[in-house]
Image: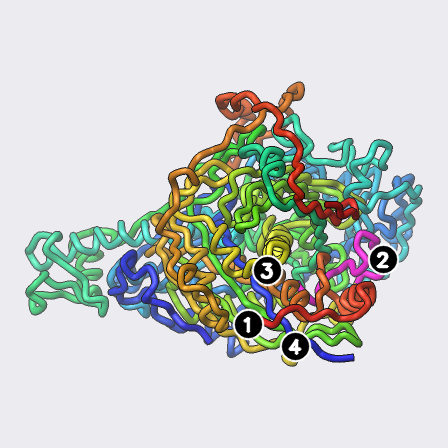
Amino acid sequence: MLELRKDIFADERDDNLKEIGKGTQRQDMLGHVTGTSTYFDDHKLQGMLHLKVLRSPHAHARLRRIDTMEAERSSGVRRIIRGADVPRNLNTLLSLINFGKDDEPSLAVDKVRYKGEPIVAIVADSPREAYEAMSKVRVDYEPLAAVFDVEEALKPGAPVVNEVYPKNTFIYHDVYDHQKLRFGDVERGFAEADHVLEQRYQMSPIEHAPTETNGSIAAPDTNGRYVVYTSTQALFFSLDTCAKILDVPSNTFHFIGGTVGGGFGGKVDTLTEPLAILGAMLTGRPVRYQLGREEEMQFGSPRGAERIYIKDGVMRDGRIVARKIRAYFDSGAYTRLSSYAVVKCVAHLPGPYTIPNVHGDVYCVFTNRTPATAMRGFGVTAMDFALECQMDKLAHLIGIDPMEFRILNAYRDGDMKAHRREAKNTALIECVQVAAEKAKWPLREEVKRMSSRKDGGGSRAAISPTPREPEPQRAVASQQRTTYDRAPPAPIHEPPPTAPPPPPRPQAPSPSHGATRFSSVFGTRRR
Amino acid sequence: MAKHRGRGIASINYPIGMNLGGDPSQALVHSNPSGKFTVSLSSIDLGQGMKSVTRQICAETLGVPVEDVYVDTADSDTGPHCMGSFASRGTHRVGNAVMAAAKEARGVMMEAAAEELEVNAADLDTDGRGNIHVKGAPHRSISTKDVAIAAQFKQGKTISGRGIFLVPLSEVNPETGEMSPATCYAHACLVAEVEVDDETGEVAMVRMDSAYELGRALNPRLVEQQLVGGAWMGISHALFETPEPYYPDPAHGPRDFVEYLMPGPGDICPHDIAVLERPAADGPFGAKGPGEMCANPVLPAVANAIFNAVGVRMDELPITPEKVLRAIKAQGGARPQARR
């Protein structure tokens, strides 16, 4: 049941439009309900071959020897593809926007870094013959110690997952093993707070579980081009990734997408297109590569796990005065998109609330598991879970209604956000008020009259003095540049120097006024 | 042993478009000689309805009926560049590109009509039903079809337009995290009511009430589809899903839908939704995007409702019956909190 509340913010809208605002039937409805919408897999081409990959049974192992002799003689096998056959067998997805270093091969060469990592690809007349040949590939593995916990991975002596990032973290700004957020002085905030609450939250990975698994069909076209039918969510992103890995100009490819059987972020990684095209290049035949359900579920890249620590300082009257967050994104064995999710998460802190002192450290950590990727709510879903559970605990701790607590702390037009931009066009307060009304949740009259458009800005727009931290030595810039037009590497663009933060204020004395200190992190509660 | 009911809330916001910007989308719009328009995109419709939303934006901007617009997507030879369908960017980014392209095409269409009617183009308006008329004199009009024929075969004009939308890429300060992550934000608040069985640890959804602020509901039916479906996904994330049930131990990973659980028809609940519209300054007709954010408030609202019902804090997702039961046992039984 959906109700449009046209009465709210009516003065900001022109509702006299002809097509906008109408519940017009979708353009593709007829195709969907009659089963005639075409998916990539509806393109059955003459002479089409099938590609399957052999995946590692180990989470971390050295590849001593790969023997494909017997597999090559297996019935129906047209071609076996190894890492050495891939023109540029190292890539990172976000090289397209100049973010991060190439760290992931299409087919593993010296080492496998997660259970399920592709090692060789087999192109055969039928899927069955590809699987039969796969059982005849002999791989000599030397198992290595593996690490699965993000905080264990950061300890000295932890197994190195990915040699491109030897400390098991993505590197930000060529210097830091995490992205920082500094706004005001949280320690001073904690010292002033009536209550301090520190908690730990954990989200496990989540699978996109699309009805249609990842897949593509590549076929030689006329004039040396290749046509690629794909389930991708991002046509040019996938096309440019393939052009880079296969080292050909981007106009070699004609990508055709279309109806996607569920994406949710799981069809950005370009998991199948490079090998399908390479198979077509090497055999001269159309090649289909689609993940099976188990592959999609276990090896197709999930929403990554996150571990989040939140420490809040709150006053008896309900104002949150300090919020400190440390979070670890489990990227799995390769970067894919987790490095970018971290920055988005930092931008999201401290949630939709105006808090004068905020401190964030968010890490992208490598472990020996399936690489994580984007999913609906990228970088935000787990943090919202943690923040809103924390909000409920804070309201409970100080004995205030949880709806009222949110309205009291909600950001309003004109407030300063922790990433140092003014809040505009805010509407959290109205959402809470309307949800309360719908749920018949009583709110005090005074709270019902509050507005996102009133009482913001002023002192709420101020940035409290932020203590300076020691700056580490800058390493040599090592980011690569890969542009859409394949231009030569451009100079690394350093962010302009910013005004140094003002000097730190004298340390405030530690609290001695009977503040409640509760910590699930250290398991102690003291008064 | 008993079943306990509880209510929990969560409120959230969500940034629209790729974080930091730098994610362009282009669109091309052209008319055929019968006055039927095609929008050419490389963008992908994932089932969310991007084709339909951009079709309405194009029709509104051109001033023609929606039936006269067809949106062609997902072809790298015919559709100009788009960053992709993710980050809740379809409506905002692609919608703006289509709007710009349609505006340019409308300009040519009005010039062609002005030539046919022998008036100034500034004096003309569209009626949204396929006609162009002189303002204040509806009888002096010409159909868009006749304008298209004249433009093509008589005047030699192409009724077409190009559009791009780009939020320039923001820097990120390494020391402070200062940045411009997004130009607008959607908002939501959701109340979840659950019933917790203290004997089995099972959590049943009773109902949800919510309010979502989305800038402008370009197509309320598509918005409803997103919000209802997204809340289902939120329930699923809160109570059911993970490919690593004992994370960080990778063992016992599910391999199919028998082992990977999701809510079935009996596990969902009534959901009463209100939609608020505070237009974004740079959104197409003020629109933001409901795509990703609609699942987010459900997870914490459910966890908070469980606390209200039985007094245990569930800080690890997913909240399986095993975890709930262990937590209830650890605190020596259910401790229902004040009903609200």
Q: Give the residue displayed 69% in from the left and 32% down from the top.
A: A177
For disc 4, the marked residue is B267
Element type at mark 1: strand
Residue type at tag 4? Asp
Question: What chain does badge 3 belong to?
Answer: A
Q: Residue furthest front?
A: A513
The mark that comes first in sequence, 2 or 1, is 1
The quadrant of the image that shows the C terminus of chain A is top right
Q: Which residues are magenta?
A: B237-253
Disc number placed over residue A43 in the picture, else none:
none
Asked whether residue A182 is drawn in magenta, I would say no
- Res A375 visible: no
Determine the CA span between mark 3 and mark 2: 26 Å
Residue type at tag 3? Gly
Q: Position of residue B242 (x, y in %)?
A: 73, 61
Give the side of residue A255 with respect to residue A211, left or right.
left
For disc 1, the marked residue is B208
For disc 3, the marked residue is A263
For disc 2, the marked residue is B251
Q: Quadrant of residue A365?
A: top right
Q: Nearer the viewer, mark 1 or mark 4?
A: 1
- Res B203 visible: yes
Q: Give the residue displayed 56% in from the left and 46% down from the top.
A: A315
Question: What chain does badge 2 belong to?
Answer: B
